[in-house]
Amino acid sequence: MCIKETLSSRITALDLHLLSTSDRSRIKDADMFVSIMCAALMMLVSAEEDIPYIKSRFSYEYSVISKLVELENDKKELGERINVLTSELNDSRHDFSLLNASLQAIIQRGRMSSGSTYVRWGKSDCPSDTGSRAIYKGYVASGDHTHAGGSGEFICLPEDPIHGDDITGGYRSLIVGTEYETGGTSKWADVVDHDVPCVTCYTPSSNVLMVPGRNQCYEGWNLEYSGYLMSSYYNHASPKNYLCVNDYPENLDSGYGSENGALLYFVAARCGSLPCDPYIDNGELTCAVCTLPPY
């Protein structure tokens, strides 16, 4: 309670009319003095009460600044950690890429080891829609059609041979190139006397079958290519094996001129021991090379 209020309560208890004029004047002056002193006291008390507030605000701001500094340090540490993790992730991606390449190579080798090969006669490329791919291109070759000895088998000689030592003395078996002998026919007259190309193909399929007499595969088999059955002339000295020569055949640019050598003719059916129902007497035989899918 203010001193003014205390004094005022006591003054009011006096009977002011009993006092003289001078006494009443002094009391009024004292009352004014008390009011001034009370006001000063109230200001002092107010100032004292402000000091804890000022201290509290300073502590709060200091705490906020400290927290901001701490967060900034955490941000830097987090950024450094992110950089480390990004580097480790890039290293892991590189390692994964190497492992994936190795795995694909192993899978590819596994597929090749479980697949098979065939020769596409009359072409220099493998069919692109069957998953097959070329191992090497070359030339169809065999023994000369006039030779009774030597091999009668057609083979696909590569176009990039590697020769061994030059062997002298002794005797030799001979191998020659092969020409189309389709002159005078209504089929493939444009390739007559041209040399015959070939390509050896790899297929992921483990089974390859040449079907003579059909240009379509049986159910469950995939068609690699189709064409016509061909071999040597029936009364030539050198008998040959049968080839399935691709329809719409190609020819080699290196040879044209009826040099003969090994020769390819269409194969026709002859009725008698071969039933002419379903076969046709003197009818050319088609063929198909088929593969069994690997599943």
Image (cartoon, rainbow, N blue to C red):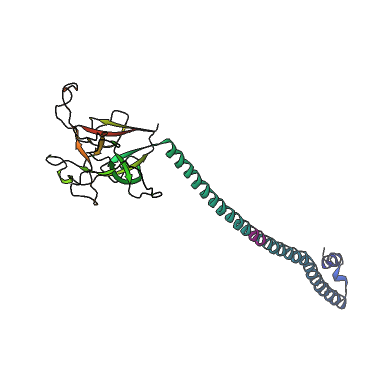
Say which residue appears at 31% left-offset and 46% top-offset. 138
Q: Quadrant of residue 31?
A: bottom right
Say which residue appears at 44% left-offset and 38% top-offset. 113
Residue 128 in sight: no
Q: Nearer the viewer, residue 90 or 28?
A: 90
> Where does the C terminus fall, quadrant-wise?
top left
Q: Nearer the viewer, residue 93 or 98?
A: 98
- Percent x, y for residue 179? 22, 43
Is 269 situated left or right of 7 in this image?
Answer: left
> Taking 151 as reference, is 50 above or below it?
below
Q: Quadrant of residue 65?
A: bottom right
Magenta stretch: give its range.
Answer: 72-77
> Taking 58 as reference, is 145 above or below it?
above
Residue 243 in sight: yes
- Percent x, y for residue 122? 25, 42
Q: Residue furthest front?
A: 169
Say which residue appears at 24% left-offset and 49% top-offset. 252
Is 181 situated left or right of 164 in this image?
Answer: left
Q: Quadrant of residue 247?
A: top left
Residue 74 colored magenta? yes
Residue 182 colored magenta? no
Q: Nearer the viewer, residue 122 or 141?
A: 141
- How many marks the image carries: the answer is 0
Magenta region's main secondary structure?
A: helix
> Taking 101 as reference, is 237 above or below it?
above
Is 270 situated left or right of 209 in this image?
Answer: left
